[in-house]
Image (spheres, grey):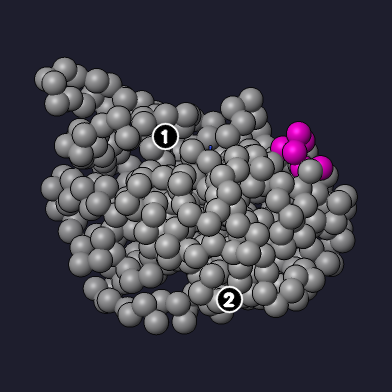
């Protein structure tokens, strides 16, 4: 992650660029100026201090956040990130993108995001539970199924969602589970939530593949091997594409003939890292981004493709499964180089869509099968992808601005 770059400034630059497209002209439309003004600031940003009793008896105070960006379309919705570099600007940017993402996905939810500045790997399981319950205790009064519904993000798991849901139930008496999504199966979680972001991305890719001039069987390089990267790698490989490189925080592995993803997943599980995987060459995360391939999928963090390396990208197309991996300057370079970018707010919206399904199931006390979940997800993702392609063509612009236009039009309708 490039720490110099403020992701919130990037997000605002993206908004400005989309709003100013002459053929779209947001400010000149009914309610357009009002919407633009509202989107330049979150409704509410909350910072909390969470005291946690550590295993050695001492007390440590962690900084936590919840940003409620806007609820024009419905309750605030967005994940909680645990990371040592998480800060308010990152959370604000992510909350802004959630507002647009829910609109792109066509779901009745607004945008929010949360986080804690912490390296969870330095905590014991018990400390992690106390921290997570602490975050919920401090925020229980602003959250709620009809108010603000969090979910997992980087380094937060179904188990953490379960602790938080349990804490919320103890405080408020609401045991519906609809206050938080991404819960474990059997604890109110939805079938398909774990794979939803990767699967949704794959449906988008399938819908746009021919339009982007990509071959039937693509060579794919994926940065990140967590929830998103691992599921994407598995799904692309299962559909006959060749995943030539994957990476985690320690580095990348590459085989131009394609990696056996099932075996890579087994190796990562046992060794805790990708390093040492047989039949592969170890390369850096930077090298992975510059590989010769059909599709590059950044699936880890923001600001990894910047002015410095955009010119060196050799992929024929990029699909952003991570949030904000490409800076606005790099976007321009890629557009000039004719490298299409499937933007995050479309590509990774499968996650929030299945989160919305989970919330809906909890409120109705239903449980849908995985088949049902993916049968509902696929047409929604394909429809949004085609609408965005259309918007981009109509306005002679790239897919990111096409996605912003679709989202802004949908939000403006509800103002
Ligand atoms: P995760 O914590 O499960 O995985 C993150 C991965 O990134 C890990 O493999 C980690 O090793 C790797 N990583 C960490 N630092 C890195 C670095 N400097 N270079 C390369 N890789 C590095 O998180 P996740 O849920 O997979 O989320 C990844 C991205 O996808 C984030 O941008 C997140 O906001 C976005 N996203 C996630 C979801 C979801 O459903 N989980 C939904 C939408 C968007």
On the picture, is 22 further left or further right than 82? right
Residue 20 lies within the magenta run: no
At label 2, counting other C-alpha atoms closer than 10 Å, the crowd grade (few under 14, some 14-19, many 20 or more) is few
Element on which disc 1 rests: strand
Q: Position of residue 31 (x, y in %)?
A: 69, 53
At label 1, counting other C-alpha atoms closer than 10 Å, the crowd grade (few under 14, some 14-19, many 20 or more) is some
Residue 309 lies within the magenta run: yes
Number of numbered discs on residues: 2
Q: Nearer the viewer, mark 1 or mark 2?
A: 2
On the picture, is 394 further left or further right than 388? right
Residue extending furthest toward the top: 58
Q: Position of residue 9 (x, y in %)?
A: 66, 33
Q: Residue at 58% of width from left, 34% of height from top?
A: 1
164 or 2, which is in the foreground?
A: 2
On the picture, is 300 further left or further right than 320? left
Q: Which mark is residue 240?
A: 2
Element on which disc 2 rests: loop
Q: Which mark is residue 83?
A: 1
Q: Which residues are magenta?
A: 306-311
Task: State yes or no: Cβ of the residue under disc 2 lies below 8 Å from any atom of ligand 1.
Answer: no
Q: Which mark is residue 157?
A: none
């Amino acid at each position: 992650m490039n720490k110099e770059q403020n992701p919130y400034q990037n997000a605002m630059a993206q908004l400005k660029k989309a709003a100013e497209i002459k053929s779209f002209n947001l400010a000149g439309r009914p309610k357009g100026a009002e919407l633009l003004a509202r989107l330049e600031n979150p409704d509410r940003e909350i910072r909390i201090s969470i005291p946690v009793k550590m295993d050695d008896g001492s007390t440590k105070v962690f900084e936590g956040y919840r940003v409620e960006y806007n609820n024009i379309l419905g309750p605030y919705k967005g994940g909680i990130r645990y990371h040592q570099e998480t800060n308010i600007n990152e959370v604000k940017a992510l909350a802004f993108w959630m507002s647009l993402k829910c609109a792109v996905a066509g779901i009745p939810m607004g945008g929010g995001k949360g986080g804690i500045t912490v390296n969870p790997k330095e905590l014991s399981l018990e400390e992690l539970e106390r921290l997570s319950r602490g975050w919920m205790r401090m925020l229980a009064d602003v959250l709620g199924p009809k108010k603000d519904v969090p979910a997992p993000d980087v380094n937060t798991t179904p188990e953490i969602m379960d602790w938080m849901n349990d804490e919320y139930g103890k405080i408020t008496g609401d045991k519906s589970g609809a206050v938080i999504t991404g819960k474990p199966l059997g604890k109110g979680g939805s079938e398909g939530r774990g794979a939803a972001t990767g699967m949704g991305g794959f449906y988008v890719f399938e819908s746009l593949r021919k339009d982007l001039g990509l071959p039937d069987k693509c060579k794919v390089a994926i940065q990140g091997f967590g929830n998103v990267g691992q599921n994407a790698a598995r799904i692309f490989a299962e559909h006959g594409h060749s995943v030539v490189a994957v990476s985690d925080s320690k580095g990348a592995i590459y085989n131009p003939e394609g990696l056996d993803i099932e075996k890579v997943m087994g190796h990562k599980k046992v060794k805790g890292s990708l390093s040492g995987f047989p039949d592969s060459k170890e390369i850096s995360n930077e090298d992975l981004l510059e590989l010769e391939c059909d599709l590059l999928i950044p699936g880890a963090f923001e600001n990894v493709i910047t002015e410095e390396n955009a010119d060196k990208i050799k992929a024929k197309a990029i699909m952003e499964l991570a949030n904000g991996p490409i800076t606005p300057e790099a976007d321009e370079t890629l557009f000039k180089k004719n490298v299409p970018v499937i933007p995050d707010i479309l590509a990774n919206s499968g996650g929030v869509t299945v989160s919305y399904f989970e919330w809906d199931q909890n409120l109705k006390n239903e449980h849908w099968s995985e088949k049902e979940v993916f049968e509902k997800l696929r047409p929604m993702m394909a429809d949004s992808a085609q609408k965005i392609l259309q918007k981009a063509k109509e306005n002679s612009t790239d897919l990111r601005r096409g996605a912003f236009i679709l989202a802004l039009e949908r939000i403006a309708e509800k103002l």
